[in-house]
Image (cartoon, rainbow, N blue to C red):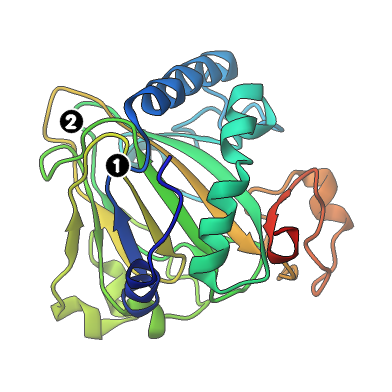
Amino acid sequence: MRHELTQQEISSYRKNGFVILDDFLDQDELEHWRRSLDHALKNRQGRKFPHSEIKTGESDGINDDAEYFGKVFDQIINLWMTDEAMKKIMLDKRIGKMATQLAEADGIRIWHDQALVKRPWANPTSWHVDTPFWSFDNREALSIWVALDDVTLQNGCLYFMPGSQNDTNFDEPGITANMGDVFNLYPKYGTAEPVPSVIKAGSCSFHNGLCIHAAGPNMTPGFRRAMTCAYMPDGSTFNGKQNVLPDEYFAKLKVGDLMDNDEQNPLIYHKDWD
């Protein structure tokens, strides 16, 4: 695993809100991630969350248009909770250190992982920001997105709006079937040029949760598999939104509570550990 970031890469991330890293995994690691994901998905039998019987593609209270979004991708969340191999992959301290460095945080916790599998002829993912959906407000929240298949312009690569993380906020514009609805809130970026993330299998990107991004449709008969993980800087507090939290845990939280439950959001790296 290529887990050492250069200062140039960190600076590029801080400026643009994203960074693309080629050859993050070597071939053996890539095959291990693929096998582990296949096994974890098989065992989950289409259940989107560990704590729920909702199937991927069904209405989950996050995306209301189940018919449209069910044809965007198969989304399976928190595989680390239900599969030991995925847990070892997602809790890797080396990845946690990378996320901590990019976020300029003291430590980093998993918010949630998710497998994102675009099936043949899948719909696009419209322009959106991530953090406003989540149960905490932190401008340094971020995600890793690891390609398990080659990602092309044709099969649904990501696109980023450079620098947009500096202008967005925690208002929740939602994510709709209309590609450009987010630009009603952020019109400046309706005329900006995005950067496509065309990457080989085993490469990855990191992006800030407030960076505007999207993904194209899959215009091919093949699958486009990705494994992602969203990260919460240590010290973040609850903002009142449930998002992916189980009902029982959500019911115990009050706005302003520290999000430090290691069973739900494990701390995977802290600068004091070195």
Viewer-side residue, 234 vs 124: 234
Q: Quadrant of residue 49?
A: top right
Apparent side of residue 236 relative to residue 260 in the rendered image (left or right): left
Q: Is residue 49 visible to the viewer in this orientation of the structure? A: no
Q: Residue 181: x percent and y percent?
A: 28, 68
Q: Residue at x 80, y 75 (%)?
A: 256
Query: Residue lying farthest front?
Result: 274
Which amino acid is tagged 1? Asp
Viewer-side residue, 106 vs 73: 106
Q: Residue 112: x percent and y percent?
A: 60, 47
Q: CA distance from mark 2 to mark 1?
A: 27 Å
Work out whether mark 2 precedes mark 1 in sequence or the reverse, and give the earlier one.
1
- As displayed, is residue 236 above or below residue 26? below
Looking at the rendered structure, the secondary structure element under dot 1 is: loop
- As displayed, is residue 90 above or below residue 242? above
Q: Quadrant of residue 80?
A: top right
Apparent side of residue 48 relative to residue 8 in the rendered image (left or right): right
Q: Residue at x 63, y 31 (%)?
A: 88
Q: Is residue 68 visible to the viewer in this orientation of the structure? A: yes
Apparent side of residue 82 relative to residue 183 in the rendered image (left or right): right
Q: Callout 1 environment at 10 Å: few (<14), some (14 to 19), or many (20+)?
A: some
Q: Residue at x 71, y 33 (%)?
A: 51
Please state, as top left, top right, bottom left or bottom right, where the C terminus lies in the image. bottom right
Q: Residue 110: x percent and y percent?
A: 64, 51
Residue highlighted by disc 1? 23
Apparent side of residue 269 relative to residue 218 in the rendered image (left or right): right
Q: Quadrant of residue 233?
A: bottom right
Mark nearest the camera among 2 and 1 is 1
Residue highlighted by disc 2? 121
